[in-house]
Image: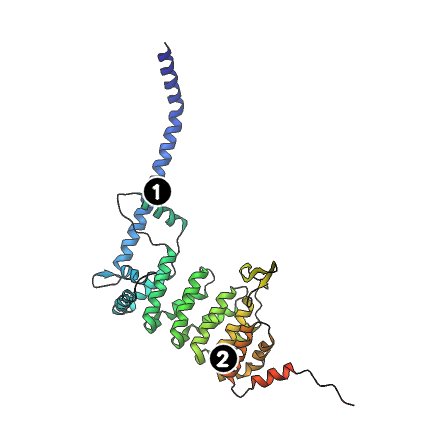
Amino acid sequence: MFDVYQLGCGFAALRFLRPQMHKRMRNQKRMLTVCLLATLVAGTGFFVWRSREPDYQDKRLSAWLENFSPGNSHASWLEGREALLQMGTGALPFLLENLGSTDSRLRLFLMSWAQRQRVVKVRFRPAYYRRFCARRAFEALGLAAKPAVTQLAQMAERRTEDVRIRSHALAILRGLGPEANESVPFLIKILEAEGDDMEIKSRACEVLGAIGPAADGAIQTLVNALDDKGNGSLDADEFSPLQNGQPLLLLGSRQMRLFAAAARALGKIGPAAKAVVPALLEGLSEDDPETRQAAEQAVKRIDPKTSVDAILRQRRTPPSPDIH
């Protein structure tokens, strides 16, 4: 009698729970279907992308980029560089795509799910890894990357981009030196943008300095950058609580670093910036040693006849009392 009663209770519970179990199973099936469809769509796009991907010695560009991964030998770097040079300008669109890559939440979820299953082996490279390899590949190309200057400058100028992507693009442009002169209008926009990241502005100044005299169209913008105070705030990482328990301001805030970067850029532009020497001389009275050094070196580059030492002595000498 007890067994019959227990069995009856079990059937009653099953009848009650059956709709909930069916609903849960349906939800799981829907989730699995969505994941499979998303994986199928992503896989189809991947294979279409790979079909257009250049190759060298029966090895695709994405495989050659592994030669530029962290920790690889110099011989591997040289081998990868040779492959890129052989692929020519056809490799640039794919390098740009890798440089600007990001990982959406959906992609991260799908890749995490794909790596847990054991049916198909999936190799996942996160966005930061792809960006790093792309940057090293661009640096390996050197002047052969010049056709991508405009796209790199646009990437650096877009404020909607991840700041790390913009930094990579600016570093590549700086490495191209005078060959990156087509980027000057975009760099000017970066410096003129209100509220933009001060570190990005400093790196834009570094690119203008690397371009040199050909960046003379940015002189006035660089002069304005000398007085750019940004949002007037200092980041927490610019303080060190190591002096008598009180915050100690490290060498220069972001504003001071921007002043120094702009001054160095003006110095590398050379004599064409002679009219801005008085503005640079103002930096000689700053407390920050990096700022003073940058201002002094810039003045010497722009106008060697200006005696910086004499100006400094004159400023240190107190005015003589009037004699009646």
Residue 153 in view (yes/no): no
Q: Residue at x 36, y 54 (%)?
A: 126
Q: Is residue 234 left or right of residue 51?
A: right
State which quarter of the image contains the C terminus: bottom right
Q: Which residue is mark 1?
A: 34
Q: Which is more toward the observer, 249 or 66? A: 249
Query: Is the residue 285 above or below the residue 19 in the image?
Result: below
Q: Residue at x 47, y 80 (%)?
A: 269
Q: Nearer the viewer, mark 1 or mark 2?
A: 2
- For label 2, the crowd category at 10 Å Cα-Cα, with few meaning under 14, some 14 to 19 and many 20 or more, is many
Q: Which residue is mark 2?
A: 267
Q: Position of residue 99 (x, y in %)?
A: 37, 62
Amino acid type, residue under disc 1 in the picture: Val
Q: Which is more toward the observer, 18 or 124? A: 124
State which quarter of the image contains the N terminus: top left
- For label 1, the crowd category at 10 Å Cα-Cα, with few meaning under 14, some 14 to 19 and many 20 or more, is few
Residue 217 in view (yes/no): yes
Res 118 quadrant in image: top left
Q: Is residue 153 left or right of residue 195?
A: left
Q: Position of residue 162 (x, y in %)?
A: 44, 59
> How far apart are the alpha carbons under marks 1 and 2?
58 Å
Amino acid type, residue under disc 2 in the picture: Gly
Disc 2 secondary structure class = helix
Residue sticking out furthest to the left: 58
- Mark 1 and mark 2 lie on one chain; the one further toward the N terminus is 1
Q: Which is more toward the observer, 253 or 11? A: 253
